[in-house]
Structures are given as structure tokens and as C-alpha cells.
């Protein structure tokens, strides 16, 4: 069986490619340039093809003899609120998904198209426990683009029986990742990550290896037209997350309590200054509100229908990830 992967050179892709090879799949990677293709082939036994999901012409012919697609390629920055960011997200997350569907629409071999979305597509939903039936409320450009990319998949599933499945991982961390978890580590080490509010600040995290396993299970077992949340069994309290991060960094730093209104006031100033200088803010009010919310994702659907199992504990995953940051001179 042959799997086409987009976004193979990214964080999740770097774990997904070897996992598929280990399971006996042939892997073909859509890569944007020759240099990245050469690097990928030097690491793994894969076939590469040069193309860009935003360029429909470059995708002609890639559907030939492909049994599965895992569509990872996306543009994301949860703090981006500018019009420019909105246009970038729309072009890549929405337009790229549409182009791929059009290319695979008449495939005779395609069995499943796994679309990587995100729990961000659900927006800052105010419920404590969220599942696939929770009403979405996307607000930021990134959130909206991920939600609309899901609708593109679902429309194709209903209109011409496209074999699409959606996976929604929450915040992913692990070796090779420099996303939001890495920012947490940097800010906590510097002592500039306050405890905002008096709540538990439940934070959903999932290790990249669990996400990769969930994506492969969705490819093998997922029902067409369905979405599956990929998260840990529980969310972690921010106090505990801070403790584990600082323990593994091996350094003490202040963890000062700041009331929510004061934090939001300071962050609004950061947003205004960033807008004046036409820069993306290092943090925005939506980040703070998301941190303050107590959010846990119910993953029963992925467990029951896919056979998804969370294997990496927070203790193990955070230790492994921070040791890797240290080895790279990043922490």
C-alpha cells in the first residue's frame, strides 16, 4: 500500500514517515523544493515528488497508484491576527486542501484521505469537556481557516462520496517540535510565565508519537466523513506543567500569580504596540483566555472507533522533549 504525505518535512511528518515505513507502507512525499526532497531521501527510504498544495498545476498526476493520503501541510500560528496572516492561512489551509481533493476526486485507488485539522478549529469553546459534537466557535484567522478546511473535506464526502477523515490533535509536543510547548518552556525558564488566575488552567497536550499512531489508525479504521479528536486521556494543570518543565530544565524561576484582568490589560498593550510596528504579538488576549479556560478533550470516539490508545505519559514525554531541547542548545 502506498501513502502520499504532504508536510512530510515538518514536525509531525518527521515522526509519521518512519512510523509508516516501519509498518510496511510505501511512502511518497509531496515536497516543495529539491533541497528538502534530497534531505528527506537521505533520511528515509521514500519516494519524493516536487509540488505545492497551493499550485494546482504542480499536483497533476500525484494521485496515480496512491492508496492513502495524509494531508499534513498547513500554515499555522495561533497568535497571528493580521489580515496578511488571514490571507496566508486561507490560501494554504483552505486552498491547498481543495486542490488536493480536486486532484484525488476521480482516483480509482484512493481508500482514505486523512486531513490534519486541529482542536483549534473548535475555537475557544466555553465547555469544560469537549468532544466532536461540541459546537465550534473559531475566532482567530488560524482557527477559522482550520474549521473551513474541515468543511471542504466534509462537503466532498457528502457531494461525491470522497473518502475523507479528519483528525483534530490538540497542542502537540515532542522531539523536533518548536511550537507552543517550546514557548512555554522558554518563558517559564526566564521566569516570565505567570500563573494567570486562580483556576487549575487545565491545558490539553498530546505527544507527537500518540498523534502519529492516531493518524495511522484513522487512515486504517476511520469512518468517512468523521472527525476524531487526538489528545491525552486528561489535561494537565498548569501548576503541574510548570513543575515538570522546571524540574527537567533543572532551574528555579519565579512563578508569580497575576489576576486575569491585569494580565489581559498588559497583553492588550502588547497587541497595540505590535500592530503599530506591523508585527505579530508574542502573545495575544486569545492566548491568555485559552490558558485560563479549563479544557479537557473527550477521546472516547477515537478510542472506540479507531482503537486509539494514549501511550506517552506527561512525565515521560516532557522529560524526553526537554532533554532534546537541551541537546540542541535551545533551553
Image (cartoon, grey):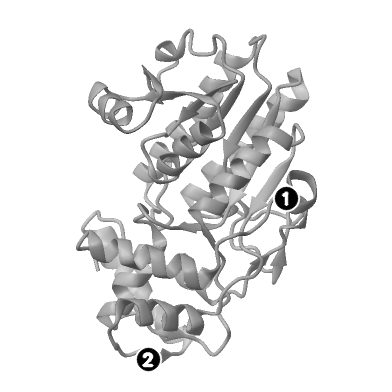
**In the rendered view, would you say 248 is above or below 10?**
below
Residue located at (59% from left, 63% from top)? 124
- Identify the image quadrant of residue 212: top right
* Residue 267 image point, x, y percent: 36, 74
**Horizontal side of residue 136 vs 257, given as left or right:** right
Residue 256, which numbered label?
Answer: 2
- Quadrant including the C terminus: bottom left
The answer to whether residue 285 of the structure is visible from this angle is no
Q: Which mark sits nearer the N-terminus, 2 or 1?
A: 2
Query: Could you say which is closer to the camera, residue 153 or residue 46?
Result: 46
Query: Could you say which is closer to the camera, residue 83 or residue 224?
Result: 224
- Quadrant including the N terminus: top right
* Residue 206 image point, x, y percent: 54, 60
- Marks 2 and 1, how far apart in space? 38 Å
**Horizontal side of residue 156 vs 257, given as left or right:** right
Report the number of discs: 2
The answer to whether residue 52 of the structure is visible from this angle is yes
The residue that disc 1 covers is: 302
**In the rendered view, would you say 96 is above or below 149?**
above
The reply to whether discs 2 and 1 touch (Cβ–Cβ < 8 Å) is no
- Identify the image quadrant of residue 284: bottom left
* Residue 117 image point, x, y percent: 57, 43
Residue located at (74% from left, 34% from top)? 225
Considering every residue shown, the one lying at the far right of the view is: 304
Classify 10 Å Cα crowding around label 1: few (below 14), some (14-19), many (20 and above): many
Secondary structure beneath label 1: helix
* Residue 87 image point, x, y percent: 40, 37
Residue located at (74% from left, 18% from top)? 160
**Horizontal side of residue 50 vs 116, given as left or right:** left
Query: Could you say which is closer to the camera, residue 78 or residue 234?
Result: 234
Amino acid at each position: 500500500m502506498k501513502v502520499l504525505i504532504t508536510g512530510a518535512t515538518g514536525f509531525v511528518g518527521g515522526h509519521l514517515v518512519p512510523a509508516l515505513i516501519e509498518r510496511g507502507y510505501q511512502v511518497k512525499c509531496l515536497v516543495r523544493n529539491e533541497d528538502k526532497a534530497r534531505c528527506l531521501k537521505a533520511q528515509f527510504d521514500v519516494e519524493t515528488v516536487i509540488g505545492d498544495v497551493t499550485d494546482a498545476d504542480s499536483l497533476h498526476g500525484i494521485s496515480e497508484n496512491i492508496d492513502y493520503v495524509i494531508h499534513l501541510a498547513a500554515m499555522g500560528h495561533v497568535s497571528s491576527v493580521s489580515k496578511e496572516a488571514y490571507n496566508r492561512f486561507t490560501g494554504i489551509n483552505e486552498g491547498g486542501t481543495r486542490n488536493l481533493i480536486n486532484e484525488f476526486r476521480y482516483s480509482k485507488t484512493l481508500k482514505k484521505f486523512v486531513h490534519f485539522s486541529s482542536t483549534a478549529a473548535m475555537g475557544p469553546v466555553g465547555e469544560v469537556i469537549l468532544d466532536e459534537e461540541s459546537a465550534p466557535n473559531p475566532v482567530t484567522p488560524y482557527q477559522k481557516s482550520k474549521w473551513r478546511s474541515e468543511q471542504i473535506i466534509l462537503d466532498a464526502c457528502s457531494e461525491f462520496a470522497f473518502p475523507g477523515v479528519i483528525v483534530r490533535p490538540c497542542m502537540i509536543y515532542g522531539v523536533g517540535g518548536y511550537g507552543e510547548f517550546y514557548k512555554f518552556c522558554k518563558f517559564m525558564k526566564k521566569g516570565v510565565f505567570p500563573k494567570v488566575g486562580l483556576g487549575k488552567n487545565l491545558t490539553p497536550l498530546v505527544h507527537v508519537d500518540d498523534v502519529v499512531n492516531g493518524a495511522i489508525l484513522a487512515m486504517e479504521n476511520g469512518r468517512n466523513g468523521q472527525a476524531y479528536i487526538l489528545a491525552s486521556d486528561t489535561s494537565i494543570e498548569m501548576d503541574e506543567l510548570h513543575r515538570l518543565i522546571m524540574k527537567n530544565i533543572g532551574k528555579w524561576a519565579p512563578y508569580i500569580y497575576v489576576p486575569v484582568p491585569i494580565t489581559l490589560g498588559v497583553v492588550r498593550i502588547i497587541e497595540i504596540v505590535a500592530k503599530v510596528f506591523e508585527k505579530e504579538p508574542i502573545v495575544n488576549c486569545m492566548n491568555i483566555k485559552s490558558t485560563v479556560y479549563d479544557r479537557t478533550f473527550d477521546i472516547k470516539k477515537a478510542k472506540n472507533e479507531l482503537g486509539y490508545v494514549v501511550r506517552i505519559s506527561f512525565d515521560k514525554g516532557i522529560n524526553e522533549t526537554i532533554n532534546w531541547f537541551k541537546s540542541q542548545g535551545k533551553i
